[in-house]
Image: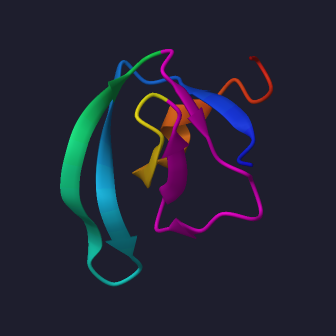
Amino acid sequence: MPEHAVIVCDSASFYANCDSSSGPAGLKRILSRGDKVGHTRGAHPVYNGWAATFDFGPNDWGFVRQECLGGYGSW
């Protein structure tokens, strides 16, 4: 289970895939401030600032900018 967090940016692009050489790909949607997500720091991958993130809304995985994740354990 990913650690509970929230989006702390006004908006955050949520991509289907990401790798260290080509960056993010496959925009899924835009997340808004306060959206409930999950990311386990130190366990889930981060590629050049793009963090593997679970979106608890539709229950799927993707990648957002690491600096847009915060409020760990707030819900």
Return the residue nearer the eye: 36 or 42.
Answer: 36
> Is 31 a magenta residue?
no
Where is the C terminus found, in terms of image quarters? top right
Please state the horizontal and vertical placement of residue 2, each as a whole percent of the image: 71, 47
Q: Which residue is drawn at 49% across and 35% down?
A: 68
Q: Which residue is drawn at 66% across and 30% down?
A: 5
Return the residue nearer the eye: 70 or 39.
Answer: 39
Residue farthest along the front direction in this orientation: 59
Please state the horizontal and vertical placement of residue 15, each as a whole percent of the image: 30, 53
Q: Is residue 66 left or right of residue 18?
A: right
Please state the horizontal and vertical placement of residue 23, each as a whole percent of the image: 30, 70
Residue farthest along the bottom direction in this orientation: 21
Against 14, residue 46 (above or below) is below
Q: In this view, does 38 lie to the left or right of 14?
A: right
Q: Residue at x 56, y 34 (%)?
A: 37
Return the residue nearer the eye: 38 or 22.
Answer: 38
Q: Which residue is drawn at 53% across and 33% down?
A: 56
Please state the horizontal and vertical placement of residue 39, each as a whole percent of the image: 65, 47
Q: Quadrant of residue 19?
A: bottom left
| Bounds of the magenta segment | 34-56
Against 74, residue 69 (above or below) is below
Q: In which quarter of the image is residue 16?
A: bottom left
> Is 40 a magenta residue?
yes
Against 12, residue 35 (above or below) is above
Q: Is residue 13 left or right of residue 2?
A: left
How many numbered markers are drawn? 0
In this picture the colour scheme is rainbow
